[in-house]
Amino acid sequence: MPAGTTNFNKQKTMWNPGYVYYGCAVPAPGAIITVVIDANGIPTPDATENPNHIHLGYTPKGTKCLYKWTKTDATDNEHTMPHDVRLTGEEMTITGQWKQLLDADLLEKMSVGGTKSSITGGTLIDFGGQDVLTPACIAVFAPRKEDPTKIIQFVLYSAYNTEGVEFTNDKDAEADSPFTFVGLSLANRPKKKQAGYIYIPSLS
């Protein structure tokens, strides 16, 4: 009898930084965000196609990108196990921490409920009374470890940060704030292409 096939391949593992971008343009179905490598070798969204993007800056431990589904079982009185199952829910999130809490543009976006204005001597972020949540397209770009010009993408078409903002004043440690971007479904897109995507570039 012939042996089966094993599948050990270190080129298909992940060991890389991830760069988080807020406010990218949502690509058409079947397309991806165009990436341009900057002078420092960092992947960025094409500025012409994504004029409103903001880089999240420093993250202390990178990001976690999640796709998860939930199910509903059909059971009966005659058997101990379900006789059918349906996929009834899906979840896509991007989680991590961000450090640049004094970036007023980021603070307004990440807080969700904040409103930025310029006043004498600085920038004011007001809170309280906001009743409109405006989601945005969130992208994580991760260079493949074998070739940093090949960029893995994890993208949520429409998402919002559920964590708000958290400030820590501590002389012994630099502050950071957690984020959890939760994806929403865009019903005007084709079925199975409504929430986001993962793109894995070929090495060849």
Image: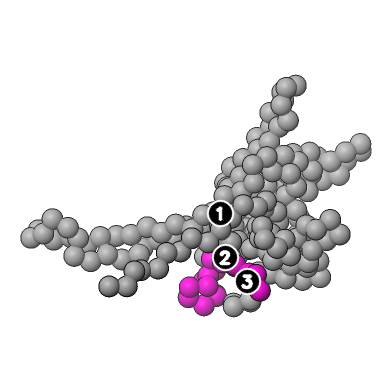
- Report the residue that reaches farthest toward the front: 1
Q: Amino acid at mark 3?
A: Ser
Residue at 51 percent across and 54 percent down: it is 66
Q: Which residue is mark 1?
A: 65
Q: Which residue is mark 2?
A: 198
Q: Amino acid at mark 1?
A: Cys
Label 2 neighbour load within 10 Å: few <14, some 14-19, many 20+: some
Residue at 78 percent across and 66 percent down: it is 36
Q: Which label sits in the foreground, 2 or 3?
A: 3
Quadrant in the rendering for residue 90: bottom left
Find numbered disc 2 in the image and state the secondary structure of the residue it sits on.
strand
CA distance separating discs 2 and 3: 13 Å
Q: Is residue 171 magenta?
A: no
Residue at 42 percent across and 64 percent down: it is 6
- Tell whether 86 sits left or right of 6: left
- Tell whether 27 sits left or right of 103: left
Residue 113: x and y, percent?
Answer: 66, 46
Whether residue 192 is visible here, answered yes or no, is yes
Residue 192: x and y, percent?
Answer: 48, 73
Label 3 neighbour load within 10 Å: few <14, some 14-19, many 20+: few
Q: Nearer the viewer, residue 18 or 143?
A: 143
Q: Which residue is mark 3?
A: 202
Q: Amino acid at mark 2?
A: Ile
- Verify CB contact (< 8 Å) between mark 1 and mark 2: yes
Q: Which residues are magenta?
A: 186-204
Residue 122: x and y, percent?
Answer: 88, 38
Disc marking residue 199: none
Q: Nearer the viewer, residue 86 or 2?
A: 2
> Looking at the image, is 165 positioned above or below residue 109?
above
Quadrant in the rendering for residue 97: top right
Could you tell which of marks 1 and 2 lies nearer the N-terminus? Answer: 1
Q: What type of secondary structure mainly makes up the magenta span?
A: loop
